[in-house]
């Protein structure tokens, strides 16, 4: 077995003892100062994790043994850390941090071109709507950010998204719009993605006579975009050193720039830049993304949790858990190390929905449900915004109260003795009491943003990006490829061809029967 395997097994041994989160506040008087960290408008409170000083020291030791500092330096210097695709990984260069002078020059030229284009479209007034066409990393980031920008900056143009190959997606996106007033932005790093090409073709048909002028593309594969029929001057490039799920900071964010303006987009980049510099420069023990990653490693490899919930108590961050599903699970959902050795216990399932809605759905399971994790339920990241952007202070106070109450309830639980006292006299007390008992000691982190500003949003997304990188280093997986999505794409192409031609190929009986249902 590998050295890495041994290191992670040691962590599991370290975690094989009972830790009472609530007791740690007495046992460790400096707990808040060690477990609460801030960078600009973002504060993260890890003190309600089932993690004590001793465990944190073990985690920092693990990070050092996994050469985290060396990997961090390689990342920022533009070394080809995406080894299986032989590429550098430099989304931070899009925010002005790291990379070579060549990268920086490319970025600066592209930023100027994007800003000039966005300003011209906004000034001209011909377009009233943007339809952004793309999927995965070419959709989730822009969609999350568009929602969040609404808190502090209004759209000048209507922005709609078409991502799914389901015709409902494109139909909803163009519904009620006038083709003459609509700019279609086709976004695809590869320009080979089935969904995006199909939606692009359907929107081009819908644009009719305006198809030539009202459609632009964003891609790292200019030739394919030209083949698709986009005029060369209407193509905005990005580079193979920008991973799809890390690409919202590139020309992939062009629709956002047009809808909200380059200044707003610039504040977003600046927020991420501040987090980049923090991650690059702070020692590991004072480093926010490192701390967040190590807490996740503890929960996964130490306490054995198989999933991680992320609950934004902010309607305008409701896409955050979907965004993180791609960011974390496409990056680290792997069972082979960089060296090709089988590995287990890498990325947990990431899931969640907005609070307070989730309280009326899956919180029952979070509070009382089982799990393979040591203390039950699943670790939760709560995300809350301190400023009220809706001019509804009473709603906002209630929202925050719910958020804070949930993390407290998960930690404290409710003892069976208290339940028995409250229900004394009931004939069915023995059956009832365990059902109304909350075990508690369920770990959570609470992240607060001073406001849902573009700057704070940049901090938040960059935090999770760097967390993902750190975890990939510790699990020794390549966080920047995604071979696992290929097989289904190939089979879908074959099945579509066979369904279209009526010539069914060699499939298992279940798949053959399913194909036979389509007439
Ligand atoms: O789902 C696989 C994937 O390759 C993602 O990594 C990517 O973000 C998405 O498809 C879209 O790819 P593209 O931008 O090339 O259309």
Image: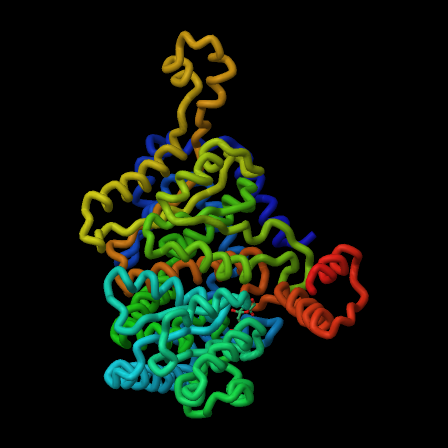
Q: Is residue 73 visible?
A: no
Q: Nearer the viewer, residue 500 or 72?
A: 500
> Ligand 1 shows up in which quadrant of the image?
bottom right
- x, y percentage for residue 188? 50, 76
What residue is rendered at 54% in x and 77% in y?
197
Name the residue rendered at 28%, 43% in the picture: 399
| 237 is higher (above) or lower (below) than 136 | below
Residue 244 lies, in percent from the top left, at 50, 71
Q: What is the quadrant of residue 302 in the picture?
A: top right
Q: Residue furthest front?
A: 519
Q: Is residue 263 above or below residue 413?
A: below
Residue 110 versus residue 296: which sits nearer the camera? 110
Residue 271, visible in the rendered structure? yes
Q: How was this image coloured?
A: rainbow
Q: Quarter of the image for the C terminus: give it.
A: bottom right
Residue at the image point whose x is 34% and y is 75% from the top:
129
Locate residue 51 relative to residue 66 in the image: left or right: left
x%, y% of residue 128? Answer: 30, 77
The picture quadrant where one finds residue 509 is bottom right
Q: How many marks?
A: 0
Q: Residue at x 39, y 72 (%)?
A: 249
Residue 364 versus residue 313 in the image, above or below = above
Position of 451 with respect to 95 (left or right) is left
Residue 209 pos. (x, y %): 43, 88
């Amino acid at each position: 077995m590998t050295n890495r395997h041994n290191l992670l097994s040691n962590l599991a041994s370290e975690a094989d003892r009972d830790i009472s989160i609530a007791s740690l506040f007495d046992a460790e008087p400096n707990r808040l100062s060690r477990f609460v960290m801030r960078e600009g408008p973002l504060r993260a409170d890890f003190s309600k994790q089932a993690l004590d000083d001793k465990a944190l020291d073990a985690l920092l030791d693990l990070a050092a043994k996994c050469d985290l500092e060396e990997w961090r330096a390689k990342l920022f210097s533009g070394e080809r850390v995406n080894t299986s695709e032989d590429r550098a990984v430099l989304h931070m260069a899009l925010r002005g941090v790291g990379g070579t002078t060549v990268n920086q020059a490319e970025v600066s030229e592209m930023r100027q071109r994007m800003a000039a284009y966005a300003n011209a479209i906004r000034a001209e007034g011909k377009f009233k709507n943007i339809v952004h066409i793309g999927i995965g990393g070419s959709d989730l980031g822009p969609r999350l950010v568009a929602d969040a920008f609404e808190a502090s900056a209004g759209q000048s143009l209507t922005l709609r998204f078409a991502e799914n190959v389901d015709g409902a997606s494109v139909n909803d996106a163009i519904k009620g719009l006038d083709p003459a007033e609509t700019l279609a932005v086709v976004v695809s790093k590869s320009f080979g993605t089935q969904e995006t090409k199909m939606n692009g073709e359907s929107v081009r048909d819908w644009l009719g006579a305006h198809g030539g002028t009202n459609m632009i593309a964003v891609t790292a594969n200019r030739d394919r975009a030209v083949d698709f029929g986009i005029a060369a001057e209407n193509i905005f490039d990005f580079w193979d050193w920008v991973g799809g799920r890390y690409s919202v900071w590139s020309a992939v964010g062009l629709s956002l720039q047009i809808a909200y303006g380059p200044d707003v987009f610039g504040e977003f980049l600046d927020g991420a830049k501040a987090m980049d510099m923090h991650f690059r420069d702070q020692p590991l023990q004072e480093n926010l993304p490192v701390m967040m990653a190590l807490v996740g490693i503890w929960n996964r490899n130490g306490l054995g949790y198989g999933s991680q919930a992320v609950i934004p108590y902010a309607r305008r961050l409701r896409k955050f858990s979907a965004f993180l599903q791609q960011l974390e699970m496409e990056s680290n959902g792997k069972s082979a190390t960089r060296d090709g050795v089988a590995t287990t216990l890498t990325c947990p399932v990431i899931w969640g929905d907005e609070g307070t809605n989730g309280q009326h759905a899956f919180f029952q399971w979070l509070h009382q449900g089982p799990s393979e994790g040591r203390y039950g339920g699943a670790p939760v990241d709560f995300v809350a915004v301190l400023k009220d952007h809706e001019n509804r202070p009473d709603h906002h106070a209630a929202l925050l109260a719910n958020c804070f109450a949930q993390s407290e309830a998960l930690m404290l639980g409710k003892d069976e003795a208290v339940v028995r006292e409250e229900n004394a006299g009931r004939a069915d007390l023995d059956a009832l009491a365990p059902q109304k008992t909350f075990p508690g000691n369920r770990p959570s982190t609470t992240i607060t943003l001073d406001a849902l500003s573009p700057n704070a949003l940049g901090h938040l997304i960059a935090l999770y990006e760097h967390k993902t990188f750190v975890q990939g280093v510790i699990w020794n997986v390549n966080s920047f490829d995604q071979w696992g999505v290929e097989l289904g794409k190939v089979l879908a192409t074959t099945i579509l061809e066979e369904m279209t031609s009526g010539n069914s190929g060699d499939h298992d009986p279940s798949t053959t029967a399913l194909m036979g249902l389509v007439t």
